[in-house]
Amino acid sequence: MQLSEFLKTISGDPNDSIKSFARRCGTTAGQLRQVAGGYRRAGESLAINIERESAGAVTCEELRPDVDWAYLRSTSVSQTSAA
């Protein structure tokens, strides 16, 4: 799901709910809107925070297709299995 679509699904007062979501992601509502509108690119850590706080509805791959997330995800699984 795209971030712009996800932001539309947030219930409650849209401004307060988006501000709360943004705080949990470690950013501002304004920056989220810029990322959702395609005016700004999410940094890798913001992409991770958005995926976590959206419970996987918006993925890192959707936000930053230029990053090799598959490699990072498989590395994490390999390290967990080795422990």
Image (cartoon, helix red, strand yellow):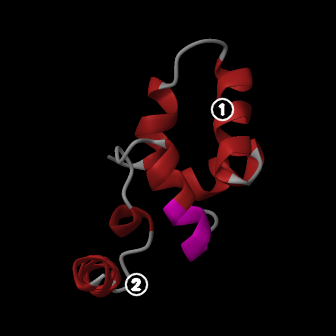
Q: Is residue 65 above or below residue 12?
A: below
Q: Quadrant of the C terminus?
A: bottom left
Q: Is residue 41 visible?
A: no
45 inside magenta stretch: yes
The amino acid on which the numbered mark 1 sits, given as a three-letter code, is: Ile
Total marks shown come to: 2
Q: Residue 36 magenta-drawn?
A: no
As helix, strand or loop, the secondary structure at mark 1 comes to helix
Predominant secondary structure, magenta span: helix
- From the top left corner, tell me how far across and down residue 27 is, in percent: 74, 53
In the picture, measured across the screen, residue 72 lies left or right of residue 40, that is left
Q: Give the image location of residue 35, x and y in percent.
A: 59, 58
Q: Nearer the viewer, residue 45 or 39?
A: 45
Q: Whole-percent x and y of residue 53?
A: 52, 44
Q: In percent of the image, x 64 and y 21: which residue is there?
A: 14
Q: Which residue is mark 2?
A: 67
Task: Tell me where residue 43 appears, x and y as whole percent.
Answer: 61, 73
Q: Which mark is residue 42?
A: none
Could you say which is closer to the camera, residue 45 or residue 62? 45
Q: Which residues are magenta?
A: 41-48
Q: Is residue 81 left or right of residue 30?
A: left
Tag 2's secondary structure?
loop
- Please tell me which residue is depicted at 64% across the width and 50% down the height of the picture: 25
> Mark 2 Cα within 10 Å, few/some/many (few <14, many 20+)?
few
The amino acid beneath tag 2 is: Val
Q: Quadrant of residue 44?
A: bottom right
Q: Nearer the viewer, residue 80 or 54?
A: 80
Q: Residue at x 35, y 43 (%)?
A: 57
Give the residue drawn at x 35%, y 48%.
56
Q: Which mark is residue 18?
A: 1
